[in-house]
Amino acid sequence: MSDKKILTKEGYKKLVEELEERRVTVRQRISQEIKEAKEQGDLSENAEYTEARHDQNDNENRIAELESLLKVAEVSSSNGKTDVVQLGSKVVVAVNNRELNFTIVGSNEVDPAQGKISNESPLGHAFLGKKKGDEVTVEAPVGMMSYTVIDVA
């Protein structure tokens, strides 16, 4: 299995922006907090210093994670102008007399509250390659669910 992580163009751009923000702005802010905390004296009982060092560690870990992810990231070549569901597609489906909207994204871009589902999830994977009017049946915790693709953008 490949170590490549597939991302949409939007998802890749967000990760690059977050990395730059953390490398520059967040590092400078934390560095200033550490400096100010050191000026308060005894570091062994200095909660501000401890907190700032913890924040610094978290930030550096996230920077390393982002750098690692971006090294193996593959940006989807989807142009978004197809009638077939692919990575980056916005899909409108009907299920149980309701319409739901999903965007098919890479596994690192998932945000269920925004309707962004992974191409690797059972539902996202089932939608891939489908067209308007196709039916998709997926096993869910409540049993088999049948979705009808209404629109693909």
Image (tube, rainbow, N blue to C red):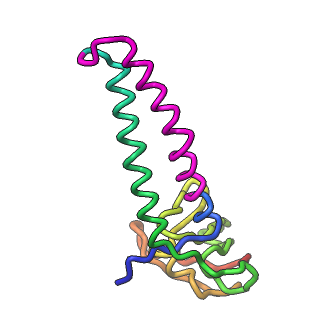
Q: How many marks?
A: 0
88 to the left or right of 81: left
**Residue sitting at x 74%, y 76%:** 153
Image height of 27 relative to 68, above or below = above
Q: Can you say which quadrant of the picture contains the N terminus?
A: bottom left
8 to the left or right of 140: right
Is 34 magenta? The answer is yes
Residue 42 at x, y percent in the picture: 27, 13
Assign the magenta stretch its main secondary structure.
helix
What's the magenta region?
Answer: 15-44
**Residue sitting at x 65%, y 72%:** 94
Image height of 143 relative to 28, above or below = below
Residue 145 seen by the camera: no
Between residues 36 and 79, which one lies in front from this camera angle? 36
**Residue sitting at x 49%, y 72%:** 73
Image height of 47 relative to 96, above or below = above
Between residues 105 and 126, which one lies in front from this camera angle? 105
> Which quadrant of the structure image shows residue 25?
top right
Between residues 69 and 41, which one lies in front from this camera angle? 41
Residue 55 at x, y percent in the picture: 40, 35
Residue lying furthest left: 44
Residue 24 at x, y percent in the picture: 55, 43
150 to the left or right of 107: right
109 to the left or right of 63: right
> Which quadrant of the structure image shows residue 69?
bottom left
Is 40 magenta? The answer is yes
**Residue sitting at x 71%, y 80%:** 79
Residue 134 seen by the camera: yes
